[in-house]
Amino acid sequence: MTDSEAEKRERAAFVLGLRHRGVQSVMVLRAMELVPRALFVDPALRPLAYLDVALPIACGQTMSQPTVVATMTEALSVNAAHRVLEVGTGSGYHAAVLSQLASEVVTLDRYCGLVVEAQVRFGVLSLHNVSAFHADGRSGLAVRAPYDRILVTASVRAVPEGLVAQLRPEGVLVAPIGDADGIQTLMRFVKTPSGLSGTALMPVRFAPLTPGLAGIL
């Protein structure tokens, strides 16, 4: 069996595990099977790539465990006509998964190094519908707005107004809401004429969304 065949089998088992842990969307499962998580982790950690665990990445950041990625992606209800904004590129893995479902993905990170590394990975996978930018996630990216879906991959006490303004009417925003030093609640918001209407999904723990750009990394 070649390395490619071995990884395909590993990814198939990975997806089966996600199904057993409650992920129901066939489209999301297929997207996660198509994207090789091993490409997005440090080479030393590749034996752990298809386990349901969070892993450290560059710049002192972390990539979420796959069940959390799947749950957040399911909650977004992305379709092939949607433009998606992701706040917090990290390794680029979640943006790559979203690229299998959306028309366009715009992803932002405060760490230039993470953006550059993610761009390289997107190139390796020929993901031409993903654009990564070095930007302050709290401000979004107005030049590409409006967005049908917004995903925030760091915790906030309240959704930043700049992101709300860039979300289309009836658009969906998913974010961890709560204090940085405790357990947060993953929330799914829909933009209505009177503001955001939210539904609690599950307890989570994410690093806080830090304002501004990183000065060095």
Image (cartoon, rainbow, N blue to C red):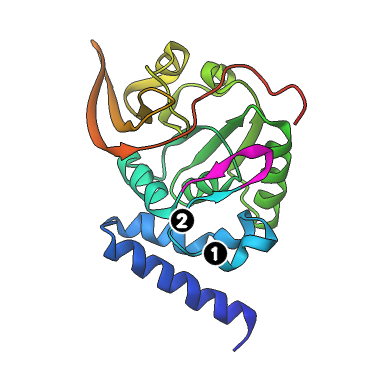
Which residue reaches farthest front? 181
67 is higher (above) or lower (below) than 189: below
Q: Secondary structure at mark 1?
A: helix
**Residue 209 in the image: x percent, y percent?**
51, 24
204 is higher (above) or lower (below) than 93: above
- Report the magenta residues as a range: 57-64
At x 31%, y 60%, the residue is 26
Of the pair 178 and 87, the residue shown nearer to us: 178
Residue to which mark 2 is pinned: 53
66 is higher (above) or lower (below) than 175: below
**Is the N terminus in the top left, top right, bottom left or bottom right quadrant?**
bottom right
Residue type at mark 1: give it: Leu
- Asked if residue 140 lies left or right of residue 30, the reply is right
In magenta segment, residue 148? no
Of the pair 153 and 52, the residue shown nearer to us: 52
Q: Which mark is residue 30?
A: none
- Whether the residues at callouts 1 and 2 have beta carbons within 8 Å, the answer is yes
**Residue 201 in the image: x percent, y percent?**
25, 37
- Asked if residue 65 lies left or right of residue 5, the reply is left
Of the pair 161 and 105, the residue shown nearer to us: 161
